[in-house]
Image (tube, grey):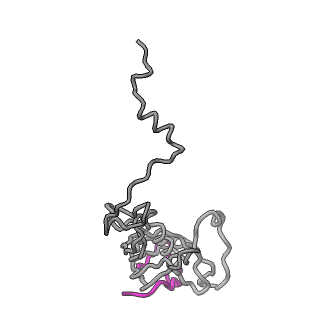
Amino acid sequence: MDTEMEFNVAQLMKEPVGGKRKYEFGTPELRLSEALAGDPTDLVARNVQGTVTLTRLGAKLRAQGAVEADVDLQCSRCLEPFTIHVQAPLEELFRQTIDVVSGHPLPQEAGDDDLDVFDIDQNHIVDLTEPVRQALLVALPMRPLHSEDCRGLCPICGTNLNLAQCDCVAEDADPRLAALASLLTDDTGSGSES
């Protein structure tokens, strides 16, 4: 697997508008997020790979492609670890900061502050690490499940109901809702007069 996430685009930036280059990229491991308080594990993508086409648009490059990776997650119902294969589109803009011919800094264009535009560094390198990280994070499920029919944990004893059945008896409803429950048990005809 290719382990390159950075590409020199100096020659592409010298070509006319519309010039293109296609690259394959990848890395064995990419940290998606730092460990949070109470959760000692980092969120890491493994076997990251993809393709990207860079198209020159004046002083910018449009990056279009796709990325895929394997991410270790925890099931939101039973809390068991599992691995999910994630695929995500890439669609980003990169801004030239240094003129390729003169080596002088380029001024920001109007409206660039409003856009999510990544910089091409002073050595004319496009680094795909951050756009790929963001694309993979967005592609992750909000409530990860190792299986759609996961039965989760018993709310009383915490037994994983996918592995064993517990003998817990479901508790009655919240006592604050007893008045509402009594409405369901009342005789529906008692309030009518003839």
Residue drawn at 64 percent across, 85 percent down: 103
> Residue 98: x and y, percent?
63, 81
Closest to the observer: 164 or 162? 164
Q: Nearer the viewer, residue 55 or 40?
A: 40
Q: Is residue 156 above or below residue 47?
A: above
Say left or right for 93 vs 25. Answer: right
Residue 19, how many percent across, how many down? 46, 75
* Front position in the image: 21 or 141: 141
Left-right relation of 103 to 22: right
In the rendered image, the quadrant that contains the C terminus is top left
Where's residue 145, x and y in %? 38, 65
Q: Position of residue 137 (x, y in %)?
A: 48, 70
Question: On screen, 192 above or below 150?
Answer: above
Q: Quadrant of the N terminus?
A: bottom left
Q: Is residue 123 magenta?
A: no
Tag count: 0
User: What residue do we see at 63% from left, 63% from top?
Assistant: 114
Region rendered in magenta:
1-22
Q: Residue at x 50, y 76 (%)?
A: 32
* Residue closest to the eye, 100 or 123: 123
Magenta stretch: includes residue 11: yes
- The image quadrant that residue 83 belongs to is bottom left
Residue found farthest to the top: 194
**Image quadrant of residue 68?**
bottom left
Side (left or right) of 97 relative to 10: right
